[in-house]
Amino acid sequence: MLSRDVEEVVGMRLQLSPEDEAFRQEMRTFFTTKVPQTTRDAVAARRDVGREQYVETQRILNAAGLAVPHWPAEWGGRDWTPLQRHIWREEMQLACVPEPLAFNTSMIGPVIAAFGSDAQKQRFLPATANLDIWWCQGFSEPDAGSDLASLRTTAVREGDEYVVNGQKTWTTLGQYADWIFCLVRTDPDAPKKQRGISMLVFPMDTPGVTLRPIELIDGGFEVNEVFFEDVRVPAENLIGEENRGWDYAKFLLGNERAGIARVGATKRMLADAKQLASEVLADGRPLAEDPRMSARIAELENELLALELTALRVVAHSADGKPHPASSVLKLRGSELQQAATELFVDIAGPLSLASFADDDSAVPEWARAATPEYLNYRKVTIYGGSNEVQRTIIAGTILGL
Amino acid sequence: MDFSYDDEQNALRQAVSGLLARAYDGEKRRAVVAADPGFDEKTWSQLAEMGLLGLPFAEEHGGAGAGHVEVAIVAEEIGRVLAPEPYVQAVVLTGGLIDAVGTDAQRGELVAGLAEGTLVPAFAHAEPGTRWSTSASGVRAAEEGGTWRLTGVKEPVPNGARADVLVVSAVVGDGATRLFVVRGDAEGLTRSGYRSHDGTRVAKVELAGTPAEPLGEGTDDRAAAIERAHSLARIAYAHESIGAMATALSTTTEYLRTRKQFGVTLNKFQALTFRAADMYVSLELARSTALWASLVVDTGGDVVTAADRARLQTSRAGRHIGKDAIQLHGGIGVTAEYTVGHYTSRLTAIDHVLGDGDWALARLAAGVGDHETVDPLGAPYT
């Protein structure tokens, strides 16, 4: 349990050390002065950030050594403490900086750095850190969601190539992607379904790859289906060993959960919600003065504080790079609080929330038009990254021994 | 920023848990709380011998000059085994008030007596008709011929019948609330003790022209001192409740692993294990907040707000874990013979002694517009 291993030799301390405080200021100054204001404004207004803004931001971060600090040092990583990484991420969110693309920096990058060949590292890692290659994820399938290991996309070896057939889904921002990293079944006869899976990477413009956008209930198109029909992939694009793909996927998903609490982003949202609730009038008085509204915000703020403090406790105990089992708590509660914050915006907007698809000619302010689509879109956060039910299974099994 | 205990703190925890494990194995607690004074005098003496009753006080008064983090460790271990000794009430709340407000002579006698285990003080403050107020209204104090006399009723007063000395809040002529020391054998003092649902003792304390000695000098209103002492006690109680919640959860998970129904152990039912997982989430979030609040005390921060935040989080968690611990056990959870229901009962008592979660939330809500964000690591973000 989390409580049992808080037994180290350093004394308890509330404030940051002078070094960490200086680090925090350095991050804050960089993020608020070097990343274009228009991009940060777009994130603050909760508008969709376009491909160019993502790429521009990540290149600015990468040039300053701030895109992939958690990678091995020889590939651009920094020897930061877990607390510094936490501060880096939180300050980025507080400053409304679009974070480095997770598919590149948290997912395939660390996998290639850990399991790829030297040639693959040379070929992919610098371009992945700099977002010269935009990666997308080919994991989920129509019949393989939380039960990912039951995936059916096949790759059959023919000479120096694999021939890939099948379908992936929920491929986020696949429309922007240059390359895909894909879990494929290479041994249909393996004794355990996890044993017959490999990881392949290939360009999205390879003949036989078809992308179909999926419209979501917020009216947006951020996820896609991807179809593979006799896609020929050079064997050198196999990551690691054949039939070991499940190990790499678990490694990758462990990284995916780091930083998933998104405390800084939710903190920003609550601050905005307070401001908006003081501007919106209800029967002539600021909505913020309604005791039920102020109590709701105060309780969310307190829960977010509890989450942030818990994240700091977890951070101090994930030194070996493996996620602490209690990181499931962060995913579970972090996603719930993100959803609660988006719900708060809809309720502050009240009737204005119906102007969701209005254009800029509308008399309704932009934040109120964005509120409901974002609330609907954020139903995803308790589903992706290991659904919250999967997290409860992990807590019950791994932590509580049930 | 570091939430790790150091070696000395870990040693303190081991010593306290060792003492309490010996004192409260098996059926011992039920026997102790069945008889007055509702706690074990021998265990109280052992806590004194270990230096725990003087932990937060200056060495010149027999204390150890330790921080609130150390006090919190003791409180958590008390909660873990539901030890009925009135640690938070006597040491943190009443002792803290005497230490903060009393004269040197009063501290020399009362704090020193508390620290060595020879004198149990209690704070007689609550009155029927008030809710977690920092002021007194029902008990009046008047000076006559150089002697202060108190008249009125205090109830419920934790350990009010057993206490050797009462610190009593009373309203004086100008409407200010002041504090007085009343000896257990004072004339015109009637104390009727009874057993509360959690096994602790509370009392009705009637004062009829009872002679009393002002605590401290001067004529200041003591509401702010009461607020601070209440806040420190709320934080200590947060830790006591964390200890109780941890045991309620571990008792529950052990039960799920061993109890069989439909031919299998209960941990085969996801409907039950998911609820246990949610209990763990509540516990760890509450623990983080309590730890933080104790660090706020030791670094001289805003103790009142930190206490309200800890109170809110531990109130929500205590209700959640207390109720579900019983539910996941089934009928045995509501029997007096089994342990887990007593944890729920104690958590319910802690939740109401110094302000419940909604009460704390109302206070936090009133100040929610005063800051942009809550930043536990440093200055607010601009």
Image: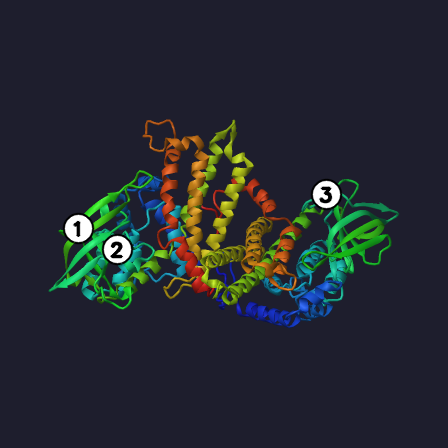
| Type of amino acid under label 1 | Val
Task: Please name the residue shown 73% across and 50% down the image.
Answer: B125
Question: Left of A229 or right of it: where is B154?
Answer: right
Q: Position of residue A348 (x, y in %)?
A: 46, 35
Q: CA distance from mark 2 to mark 1?
A: 25 Å
* Chain under disc 3: B
Q: Are marks 2 and 1 on the same chain?
A: yes
Q: Which mark is residue A209?
A: 1
Q: Secondary structure at mark 2?
A: helix
Instruction: Give percent across and percent down for residue B375.
Output: 48, 49
- The three-letter code of the residue at mark 2 reads Ala
Residue in the foreground of this view, choosing between A388 and A150? A150
Residue B24, position as x, y percentages in the image = 65, 69
Q: Position of residue B323 (x, y in %)?
A: 57, 54
Front in this rendered view, residue B349 or A90 = B349
Neighbourhood count class around disc 3 (C-alpha, 10 Å): few under 14, some 14–19, many 20 upward:
few
Mark toward the viewer: 2 or 1: 1
Query: Label 2: which residue?
Result: A129
Question: Is residue B68 visible in this depiction of the protein?
Answer: no
Label 1 resides on the chain identified as A
Q: Earlier in the sequence, mark 2 or mark 1?
A: 2
| Badge number at residue B11 | none
